[in-house]
Amino acid sequence: MNKRLIAALLLIALCALIFIFTGGSTTVEMFALSFKMKSSLALLSFTGIGIVIGALLKLS
């Protein structure tokens, strides 16, 4: 395993720990819309968006 793979796995583990220990709910406001959701789901969705953006940037 190379250093990049180990770093990626450590970041995934860190995100998983944050998702597990984060409780409560949050309100996400985008443009004129407002969504109330669990904090862990909000973190998961924004992490997924970041992964997609990173993958798209790597492909270009």
Image (spheres, rainbow, N blue to C red):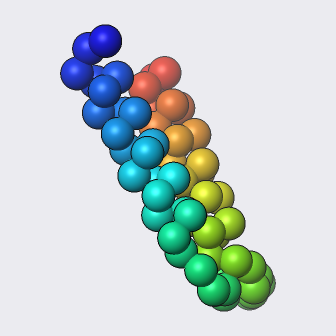
Q: Residue at x 37, y 44 (%)?
A: 11
Q: In the image, 20: left or right of 31?
A: left
**Residue 28 occupies which quadrant of the picture?**
bottom right
Give whichever of 33, 24 is nearer the camera.
24
Q: Residue at x 43, y 45 (%)?
A: 13
**Residue 52 occupies which quadrant of the picture?**
top right
1 versus 26 height, above or below: above
Give whichever of 12, 50 is nearer the camera.
12
**Residue 40 occupies which quadrant of the picture?**
bottom right
Q: How many numbered discs? A: 0
Q: Residue furthest top?
A: 1
Q: Position of residue 12 (x, y in %)?
A: 45, 43
Q: Position of residue 15 (x, y in %)?
A: 46, 54
Would you say residue 29 is visible in this rendering?
Answer: no
Q: Position of residue 48 (x, y in %)?
A: 60, 48
Would you say residue 60 is visible in this rendering?
Answer: yes
Quadrant (top left/top right/bottom left/bottom right) for the N terminus: top left
